[in-house]
């Protein structure tokens, strides 16, 4: 044992044995979903199957969003120079920053702030929302997780909230998020519907995920999409092509049902 | 439409609608697992629930393997300098290269080569294995996916194969992988048991995944582990500490059962 | 011209002509140093030969600092997995963050703050320094660019300042930096000698470089060192070796004179 | 001393002393150029002032080439998401891969191969060139370092070669490169003038730089350009703008003379 000796509580490896947060991984294989494993490794405890299903849903919701997001354009541009898949995906992740994917963490902090204020003051949820939004307005801050360049009614938001209710996982932060959506209309005079990041932020708060890893759900989910884009670029496109950021067209399968 | 117009078959976004490989994503949320979504976005078709379960198992098997792998040490070192989570995870992925995580793609190419040879020549599987391994030996190449620094009997390998059999997804590449394990003993005189990369390689071949994205399963899975390590480093460790690559100790929960 | 048309003032390329900030690059080759070109491309104007010499000196001062900095350990760890040189260097740069290399920008902001305060209030430099340092102390902030884990008297600091004086480029921020060094002793009671980052910060302020690109001088300089470490790792070390962060020894040429 | 003890020959740090390849860095500051320091740290020996001037010229020649190269578009795209400067520059470097910047290493290997063949066979340079180019043609390989999308007569190439001649540093690889340019016309029937990568490749061969670090000269030089683009993007552009890869216009200073 050297003077640099250190400790870690994530996983333990010895000959012929790998344990994650105490669980032998061979006992987990085939018995829990990857979504459950993600929660286990990030939170330290095994989630219920219901929580697992909600994590699955959150990860499914952000798996891809067309070829326009900067993470996709970055990963494709790096790929077009002949780089390896891992390096192109890594570059894509470097583009998942404050303005792209960053709204989950910020949304979480907002919902926690309002909810904490409500409890501390004994105010109604409506009043706590109004107070915080007005304070933000006076400081010219905007509420993360609301409004979308394209979607007036983000189809993913409603579905995620409905599922959380079905699974018995709708909590006070979901309520808070809905109250913020309503409050924003009153305070700003504009309709700023909750987007998928706002919805995920609320659900993660109710799952007691720390805000600092809120964006990690988006990163993990979007790695799936990035790999698909890198693979398509590598196998179907000419190296060093000029990649237009908006002038592309979908030519995949027509709309289909599950 | 400019002269840089291009096409993509992965996902399609229009106001209030997001479709992945043709499926409206709001219909997928809560109805398929993230593992199924990964297969869908990478392969282009919706997998059966059984294939989904096998993908889940593959992703669970590689979620973390202690604090020693170079991807973990890289992500922690970058974190210790004060970098953002996304940048630290990206750096970790840059360390998932030829010698770390790269065995899946190489193993897939080996199993496909043997299996193709067997079909083309009409030889027995045993002969095809022997011929290829001898050729590799004469060129001083080693078979990827066999042997492990630490595990004589990788606990994950057996479990994955047993699950594939239970799910009716054991195919000719699994058979090939087992024949290679046997053949290696004869050709090299050493016992080189299949490791988890070799097992995953065989399963992915049987699922008809292209070898070029074989390593992506490892990357995606390990992003989960990397996030946990980055978070632990950021919240529990002193910035700029010197990170010893082997002298660490597990201090998490004791062994427990599911 | 599309609706995404945009403008850039850095360089202009047309058939058989490349101009950087207006200067045809073929006229620059052989007539200015790379250090001058760096200043030109970053600031937009051609520096005098004296300024070029000072930039050269700043870049020389940080070219390498042993194998222990996290950027070096990161680049070597990524290299040891078989990654390409560009990817390993990129990972190293991701480790040049707040606590490693970040002191230049923070030092610049400190010196600018003190100097601005002095001018606005008409106070003496000593008083402005005392006021700012006391304010920082009360907020438990430490002054970036002072103190070093290893060097009591950073040999690079004195040399850089002497050179700036010889070149006629010593200005009010250098004076400020020296006053901070003195003031820190009085305010904290500890000797916290200026380190190389602090010295570079002062010089860059006097050269009117914007603080946001202060760290870029360190990044550019250290890319040179990182390439050397990546090359040594790739050509002399075993792949996947465990890289100890402190237990290494220099075995290069003995001390020699220019 | 642990069992992970290792050795490095690049630089040595002890209290109040930093030595690079044996030279105390405080003795180097102000006495050698950064270009000389780069050569010193990469090759291990102090270059003559003439070699330093040629390295300066090589680094100046590639400092920037408009906003169109994939490394620039990558760094700008990552910047537009709110990422830190170091992360954006790192992503840009990940795009300096086989097809972008990779021609220097490949060109070096070509010139070394021809030159070695010439010496081994005793053939004339012309014959060695013809033989190698015909062999490459039959294998459908193209010669790296020749031909350019835009420049028929790369203004940087001639200037670099003229400077090498003036400095007495024109060697047999420069001769080889010129013979390849001539030979390509005969073998392919097309005019494929040497580009700046080909010229740099020839000069680096004559300087006895190992081909594996040939691209590092381009990476180091272009880091300067990337920082300028990242800074311009961060300070002048709207976050998350859509970055067109070709529809941009130079609005910097008009052409000017040194």
Image: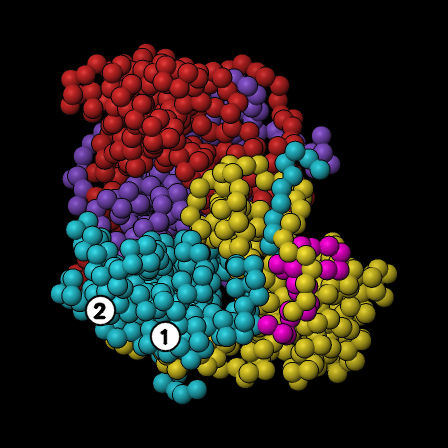
Chain colours: A yellow, B cyan, C purple, D red
- Residue D99 pos. (x, y %): 44, 36
Highlighted magenta segment, given as a residue range? B12-32
Q: Are marks 1 and 2 in contact (CB under 8 Å)?
A: no
Tag 1, which chain? B
Q: Is residue C229 left or right of residue D117?
A: right
> Magenta segment: does it hold B24?
yes
**Label 2: which secondary element:** helix
Above or below, A141 against B232 in this view is above
- Residue C109 pos. (x, y %): 54, 46
Q: Which mark is residue A15?
A: none
Residue bearing the label numbered 1: B161
Q: Residues within 10 Å of mark 1 (few under 14, many from 20)?
A: some
Q: Is residue B148 left or right of residue B172?
A: left
- Identify which residue is drawn at 37% across, 30% down: D140
Above or below, A29 against B186 in this view is below
Specify which label sits upstream in the sequence, 1 or 2.
1
Identify which residue, B161 or A100, lies in the foreground.
Answer: B161
Q: Which mark is residue B182?
A: 2
Tag 2, which chain? B
């Amino acid at each position: 044992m050297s003077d640099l000796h250190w400790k870690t509580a994530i996983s333990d490896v010895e000959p012929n044995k790998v344990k994650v947060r105490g669980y032998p991984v061979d006992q987990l294989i085939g018995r829990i979903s990857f979504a459950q494993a993600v929660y286990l490794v990030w939170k330290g405890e095994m989630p219920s199957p219901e929580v697992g299903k909600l994590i699955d849903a959150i990860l499914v919701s952000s798996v891809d969003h067309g070829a326009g997001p900067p993470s996709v354009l970055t990963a494709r541009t790096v790929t077009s120079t002949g780089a390896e898949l891992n390096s192109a995906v890594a570059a894509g992740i470097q583009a998942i920053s404050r303005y792209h994917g960053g709204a989950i963490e910020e949304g979480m902090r907002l919902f926690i702030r309002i909810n904490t204020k409500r409890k501390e003051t004994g105010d109604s949820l409506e009043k706590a929302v109004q107070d915080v939004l007005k304070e933000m307005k006076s400081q010219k801050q905007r509420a993360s997780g609301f409004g979308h360049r394209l979607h007036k009614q983000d189809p993913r938001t409603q579905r995620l909230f409905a599922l959380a209710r079905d699974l018995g996982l709708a909590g006070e932060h979901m309520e808070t998020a809905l109250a913020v959506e309503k409050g924003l209309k009153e305070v700003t005079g504009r309709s700023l519907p909750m987007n998928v990041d706002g919805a995920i932020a609320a659900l993660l708060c109710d799952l007691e995920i720390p805000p600092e890893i809120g964006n990690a759900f988006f990163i993990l989910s979007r790695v799936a999409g990035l790999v698909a884009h890198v693979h398509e670029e590598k196998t179907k496109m000419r190296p060093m092509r000029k990649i237009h950021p908006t002038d592309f067209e979908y030519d995949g399968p027509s709309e289909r049902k599950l």
